[in-house]
Image (tube, helix red, strand yellow):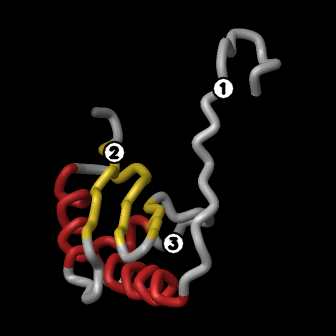
């Protein structure tokens, strides 16, 4: 990337998450909670690459991606918070055109 014209620096923050059956169970439960909501799944789950990314590290969930509006962001956050055994949910979803 740093060889591309106009790029002055590259800040590599890629992190390899530890293998954890506990985190895998949370990730699956989060996916089902979020994409199981008909109002969410019809807009986001049918895409080739779903725009909502669920990152789980040591029981802590981070939601990243882009959603259409503030209401969807709130619904997704509430659904993610409803999953048992999750220590925290950070909602880093961005709203389109804002």
- Which of the marked residues, 3 or 1, is nearer the chain's N terminus? 1
Callout in the foreground (3, 1):
1
What is the x, y in percent for residue 39? Answer: 27, 74
Indicate which disc, 2 or 3, sits on the residue closer to the N terminus: 3
In which quadrant of the rendered view does residue 49 lie? Answer: bottom right
The image position of residue 71, as x and y in percent, is: 17, 57
Who is closer to the viewer here, 74 or 60?
60
Mark 1 crowd level (few <14, some 14–19, many ≥20, 10 Å Cα): few
Query: Is 54 left, or right, of 89 in this rendering?
Result: right
Q: CA distance from mark 2 to mark 3?
A: 19 Å
- At numbered mark 1, what does the secondary structure look like: helix, strand or loop? loop
Q: Which residue is mark 1?
A: 10
The quarter of the displayed image where residue 34 is located:
bottom left
Rounded to the nearest angstrom, the CA distance separating label 3 from label 1 is 33 Å
Q: Residue at x 33, y 34 (%)?
A: 97
Q: Position of residue 22 (x, y in %)?
A: 46, 88
Q: Look at mark 2 in the image and give the residue it sits on.
A: 94
Q: Provide the residue designation for mark 3.
A: 46
User: Closer to the camera, 2 or 49?
Assistant: 2
Residue at horizontal 18 percent and vertical 71 percent from the top: 78
- Secondary structure under tag 3 reads loop
């Amino acid at each position: 990337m740093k060889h591309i014209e106009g790029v002055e620096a590259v800040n590599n923050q890629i992190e390899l998450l530890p293998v954890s059956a506990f985190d895998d169970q949370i990730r699956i439960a989060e996916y089902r909670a979020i994409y199981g909501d008909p109002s969410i799944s019809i807009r986001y789950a049918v895409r080739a690459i779903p725009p909502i990314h669920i990152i789980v590290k040591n029981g802590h969930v981070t939601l990243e991606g882009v959603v259409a509006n503030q209401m969807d962001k709130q619904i997704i956050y509430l659904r993610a918070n409803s999953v048992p055994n999750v220590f925290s949910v950070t909602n880093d979803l961005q709203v389109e055109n804002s």
